[in-house]
Amino acid sequence: MELHVPLGSEIVLPGGERAILKFVGNVESKSGIFAGVELIGQMSGKGKNSGEFKNVQYFTTKVPNSGIFLPYQRLLETSNMQRLQAETPTKTKRNVYVSRSPLAVSNQQGLKRSSKESSPSTVAGNEGQLHSLKTENTHLSQKCLKLETQLQECTEVLESMEKVIKDHYEPAFNQMEKDLSEKNEKISKLKVSFDEQKTELLDIIDSLEKQASETEQLYTKELKRLREECAAYKNKDTAKETNELQRQLKVKEKMCQDWELKYTQLKDSKSKEENDIIQGYQREIDDLKAKLSSSQKAQPEKNTEIEEQLQRLKAENRSLQQQLETAREKEKIQPLTSTTTEQSTLLDENGNLQIFVPKNSDPANGRKKWCGLCEREGHDSVQCPFENDMF
């Protein structure tokens, strides 16, 4: 039967050293329940620590390096052995302090007082009371052990849960924290990069807008200059073209005057020829009339034949008159047509005077043939009939 040891109790360690219980509970990186005690007496200051383990303070000691940790179950086993030895009937006295609960201490003190104050007649009653107290103490010890067992089970479950958390969830949490940290770092870098790119883009946009404005101004000035030059060239070319057209117009007017003069001369000559022809026909008619008149007088029988001949001559005269009128009309149209044709042949598609290129002429054209082989005229050296005679 195990005994519960309260904190602050003086206990005896497995090696017989005296100590005071300062701590009961879990210790970091250790499994199970541990007890922290402070050595007293001759072992004071010969412990392993001052109540701390791995930089965690679990209890304090009056003297440095007087604290040690040991399994709580081992401490309970040592306390139970000491309790059994104390309950064994013996007359020997030991200078050993056994770990006791406050209830047991109070019961023993009460018994001592009662034994001093009571008479021998009340010993039997006290023994019965002591037996009942022991029974109650045993029941309470069992209850404490049961509670300690439940606490141990809860502690084991808690440790297993902590282990599961450390083994499974904690790496995941650590990985998630690491990933989150990396993502935050990436986001920060991307934000810095985006800010830099945004600044660069704004600078580029400002530079492009400035260049576009300068280019627009430059193109506007250049376009204005080109328009002014174009207007100047246009005015210059227009004046030059006007002068050229006036010159060509004068030339054409002169040509028209020449053609009109030629037409007048030709018309006069034609009119003179026509008048001569008409006069000739008129003379023939007069001669025929004279002959007719004389023939009427001389030969009345030939009047009919002469009359027919006269009618035929009149018809021919009328036909000649019509031909003459037609010829005159043609003569009026032909000079104008020839003048227009001649003028059009002198101009090109744009209305400018054409420049006629003279035909290639042979410098030897019209000269007498001369043979250099026989040195004779009448043939050349290719057609020389005396070539075989030369040696």
Image: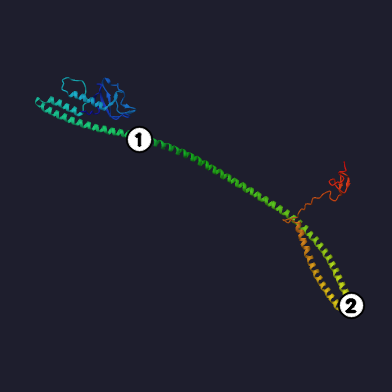
- Left or right, 235 with reference to 84: right
User: Which residue is located at x 36 percent, y 35 percent?
Assistant: 170
Residue 100 position, x and y percent, is 21, 26
Residue lying farthest to the left in this orientation: 121
User: Which residue has dot 2 on it?
Assistant: 295
Amino acid type shown at disc 2? Ser
Q: Nearer the viewer, mark 2 or mark 1?
A: 2
Residue 242 position, x and y percent, is 73, 55
Residue at mark 2 to residue at mark 1: CA–CA distance: 165 Å
Q: Quadrant of residue 50?
A: top left
User: Which residue has dot 1 on it?
Assistant: 168
Q: How crowded is the residue under tag 1: few (<14 C-alpha within 10 Å), some, or many (20+)?
A: few
- Left or right, 148 with reference to 307: left
- Left or right, 318 with reference to 143: right
Residue 107 position, x and y percent, is 17, 28
Check the image and report above or below for 290 versus 242: below
Q: Nearer the viewer, residue 282 or 149?
A: 282
* Earlier residue among tags 2 and 1: 1
Q: Quadrant of the C terminus?
A: top right
Amino acid type shown at disc 1? His
Check the image and report above or below for 356 versus 19: below
